Image (cartoon, rainbow, N blue to C red):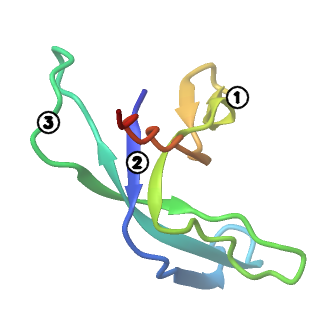
Amino acid sequence: MIQVSVKSTDVRNQSGNAKASGKPYSLNFQTVWVHTVDRNGNPNPYPEKTEVILEKNEQGAALFYPVGEYTFAPASIYVSRTGDLALSPKLVPLKAKPAPVQQ
């Protein structure tokens, strides 16, 4: 399991016209921190910063992830049209660890 930390609900918008088609586009991004491992499976000492593209609601507003801890949903991984394994991050919240039982 790969842990993803969301530390802020800030959303960055990028919009313009596509060069190939000339059609307008608008994408919303959110910064996340991914806890990766090295080639030997050892956890890296620090999470790595990246951005995920956010889905939009019916009105076109970005559906951002609340601050918290997540992992990738199974639907995040797919085989591309060229047959390569690809990732389109969709996050699901990690279950909170249960509080220790006091005796």
Q: Which residue is located at x 62 percent, y 85 percent?
A: 16
On screen, residue 34 versus residue 10, left or right, reads left
Disc 2 secondary structure class = strand
Q: Which residue is located at x 80 percent, y 81 percent?
A: 60
Q: Where is residue 63 in the image (x, y as percent from the top left)?
A: 69, 71
On screen, residue 98 versus residue 37, left or right, reads right
Q: Is residue 99 above or below residue 83?
A: below
Q: Give the number of the disc on residue 81.
A: 1
On screen, residue 46 versus residue 18, left or right, reads left
Residue at the far right: name it. 58
Looking at the picture, which amino acid does disc 3 mark?
Asn
Observer-side mark, 2 or 1, equals: 2
Q: Give the number of the disc on residue 4.
A: 2
Query: Looking at the figure, which quarter contains the C terminus?
Result: top left
Give the mark nearer the N terminus: 2 vs 1: 2
Query: Looking at the figure, which quarter contains the N terminus?
Result: top left
Q: Mark 3 points at which residue?
A: 44
User: Mark 2 to mark 1: distance in Å?
Assistant: 27 Å
